[in-house]
């Protein structure tokens, strides 16, 4: 209650960097859209079925997009009202759904049909380092599955792995 009183519309807008309400300065929320895939849903068969790809893209990823956009619109309304409590409460939904959208957008780009060079295990420096650090690609998959099972938003396990190895390969 004290936070709500303290964070009036004027106070909130000043804290966010303006002398006037932020919503008036930046009306109109920039939302995200579900990206189109550069390949057909069935292009990754038999490794991943077309039906699984369609569900993952059209339902799962689409839900992240819808919930992220909804949270952004609610944030815009909360800022316009000067409702600091609502702004704080929306942070989790924005991080979770925005992160899910970003992770999935990267995921779709990292997949390739065999006809475009996909479907092969890592070769060269990356393949060697996976074998060196984990023993085998299968052991890496097992470790990532175990680590990811313990996390909400387990796609971050994949991102952490990708960033670590990208940095390793560059150095």
Image (spheres, rainbow, N blue to C red):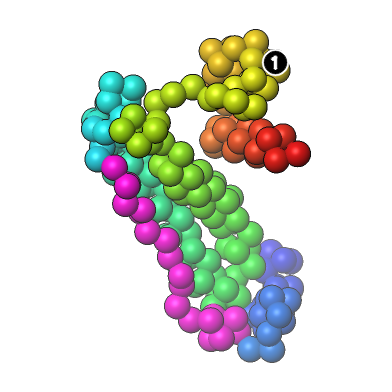
Q: Along the horizontal axis of the image, is 107 left or right of 144? A: left
Q: Along the horizontal axis of the image, is 5 left or right of 29? A: right
**Segment tinted magenta in the rendering:** 21-39
Q: Quadrant of the N terminus?
A: bottom right
The residue drawn where x is 55% and y is 77% is 81
The percent coordinates of residue 64 (x first, y second) are 42, 48
Q: Tell me the residue that label 1 is attached to.
A: 132
The residue drawn where x is 48% and y is 81% is 27
The residue drawn where x is 36% and y is 40% is 60
Q: How crowded is mark 1: few (under 14 residues within 10 Å), some or many (20 or more)?
A: few
Q: Which of 11 and 49 is in front in this view?
A: 49
Residue 28 vertical placement versus 112 (above, below): below
Q: Along the horizontal axis of the image, is 133 left or right of 102? A: right
- SS class, disc 1: helix
The percent coordinates of residue 115 (x first, y second) are 31, 33
Residue 74 vertical placement versus 138 (above, below): below
The image quadrant of residue 137 is: top right
The image quadrant of residue 104 is: top left
Q: Can residue 149 be seen in this view?
A: no
The percent coordinates of residue 31 (x first, y second) are 43, 65
Q: Along the horizontal axis of the image, is 143 left or right of 119? A: right
The residue drawn where x is 64% and y is 20% is 128
Q: In which quarter of the image is the C terminus?
A: top right
Q: Which of 59 and 169 is in front in this view?
A: 169
The percent coordinates of residue 20 (x first, y second) are 63, 89
Q: Main secondary structure of the magenta part?
A: loop
């Amino acid at each position: 209650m004290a936070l709500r009183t303290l964070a009036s519309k004027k106070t909130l807008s000043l804290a966010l960097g303006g002398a006037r309400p932020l919503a008036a300065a930046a009306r109109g929320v920039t939302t995200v859209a579900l990206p189109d895939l550069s390949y057909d849903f069935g292009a990754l068969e038999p490794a991943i079925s077309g039906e699984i790809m369609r569900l993952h893209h059209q339902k799962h990823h689409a839900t992240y997009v819808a919930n992220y956009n909804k949270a952004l619109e609610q944030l815009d309304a909360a800022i316009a009202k000067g409702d600091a409590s609502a702004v704080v409460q929306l942070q989790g939904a924005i991080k979770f759904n925005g992160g899910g959208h970003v992770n999935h957008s990267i995921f779709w780009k990292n997949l390739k049909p065999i006809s475009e060079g996909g479907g092969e295990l890592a070769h060269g420096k990356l393949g060697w380092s996976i074998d060196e650090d984990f023993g085998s690609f299968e052991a890496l998959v097992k470790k990532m599955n175990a680590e990811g099972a313990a996390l909400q938003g387990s796609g971050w396990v994949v991102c952490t792995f990708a960033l670590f190895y990208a940095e390793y390969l560059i150095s």
